[in-house]
Image (cartoon, rainbow, N blue to C red):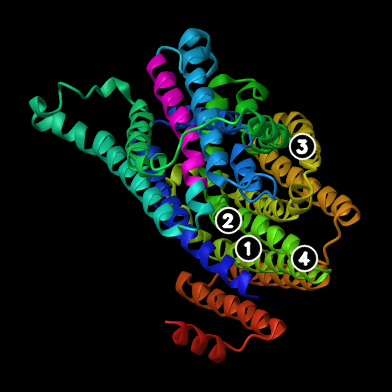
Amino acid sequence: MAGIKSLVKDTAIYGLSSIVGRFLNWMLVPLYTIMFPVEEYGVVTFVYSVVALAMVILTYGMETGFFRFGNHEKWTDPMEVYSTSLMSLGVSSAAFVVLVLAFLDPVTRWMECDGHPSYVVIMALCVALDAFMTIPFAYLRYRKRPMRFATLKLINIGLNIGLNLFFILLCPRLLELWPDTVSHFYDPGFGIGYIFLSNLIASAVNMVLLIPELRGFRWRFNATLWRAMIAYSAPLLVLGVAGVMNQTIDKILYPHLVSDPEEAMYGLGIYGANYKIGLLLLVFLQAFRFAYEPFIFARSKEAAQQSGSDGATQRNRAYSDAMKYFVIFALFIFLGVMYYLDFIRYLISPRYFSGLKVVPLIMLGELFFGVFFNLSVWYKLTDRTMYGMWFSLFGLTVTLVLNVVLVPRIGYMGCAVAAMCSYGSMMVASYLIGQRKFPIAYHVRRLGVYALLTAVLYAVGYYGINMLGLHVAVAAGLRLVLLAVYVLVFVRIEGINPRTELRAILHRR
């Protein structure tokens, strides 16, 4: 249980940067949707979808590989693992920038940035920096320094947001009132490029702040270790590419599946804005992931050091409990977002409200992906990462087929349905095969009870209350009561004594 409490604490700290950062970034969405045409926001959505794919390719599974080999029985020097990982990503990131510059014109056209090659150069530099920085950030997680991790992430986010506000809001006003103050560096025609430039400056500052993590050890490259890490991480690269394509391929394909190009970018802008609301659950998943990977490999190492089956039993119980609490909290977040969607929707401009119907489907898809991520423990610990690759390719196939079939018929709703079905199929396949290869006694029946409870509360609290036509404040109050019912059922089923837990927390302080 101590391990689970540590996992919860680290998840909460990592969640600070993720939750606050995501919230603040979402606060920029109304700015983008007001200041730029829907079609231009569609270009932003497209560019960042490609960037997400490039990030996975450029990190090629080395982050997870670092945790695996940093806790490996054979490689006793974690700093050698760290140094080798850094040098590998440093070389590959630099090579990526050179390739983009060498083929700048065709890349610019493909990225829907025709006439603005500077957009592509800026984002190539940004992606290269962010890819390299995944290892120093992984090192902070390895060393269990969540506070420094969260602080650096928040600085990056705050700077990015501040620069967005400066370039998009303040500079046009200064250009109008006192042109001499900004005319030497600000160009109104650069438009959405200032979104990308803000991102690059923030990443560059973060790189400077990470210099302490790049000093104080001997830089050395172990070719034998590197080959072992690549062999371990290569399937994770395919897994990651397939996984991120599940999240982004719909946005990349959408312009090609809709006959009218202008209508395509307009629809993509609508879908992209509402997709961000659906990703509220992803904030929790990201925070959980930051804490979970170090957690599972540390538990595996402890189990290997214990004699008999007790270590393995305790390890598997910890994994099962982690899955249980993840699903419980994820379902609670789902209810909260759907109950208060009438308020949350103002994170985007009212021009985009027609796409709100995708939100529950996107959130369910992210819940399924979170469960799939928890289930991935069996093939990561047994070094059977090829299975993760096959699961992701299976999910990608479902995504591609459903997008091609549904998007021409029902537009961006087809993208949302495809995402949900893809993650659901990956989750089921991983569970069924995982129980044969690496059995873990998950709390399946209990989680089924929570899922049923959530479905009932969702139907009553969302559709039922909407049908009554109550005042917004009254409806919000009733939904708060229903959320309290969920919490009370959770406390009762899990046998939690709030007073005892509160006294324990106060005693630790």
Q: Which residue is mark 1?
A: 330
Label 3: how many Cα within 10 Å (few below 14, some 14–19, many 20+): many
Q: Earlier in the sequence, mark 3 or mark 2?
A: 2
Q: Nearer the viewer, residue 78 or 445?
A: 78
- CA gap, disc 4 to disc 2? 26 Å
Which numbered dot is residue 389?
3
The residue identified by callout 2 is 281
Q: Is residue 61 above or below residue 252?
A: below
The image position of residue 155, as x and y in percent, is: 33, 48
Specify the segment rendered in magenta: 117-138
Please give the label number shown on residue 316. Answer: 4
**Mark 1, other Cα within 10 Å: few <14 / some 14–19 / many ≥20:** many
Local SS, label 2: helix
> Dot 3: what SS?
helix
Q: Position of residue 291 (x, y in %)?
A: 57, 58
In front: mark 1 or mark 4? 4
In the image, residue 300 sits, relative to residue 85, either above or below, namely below
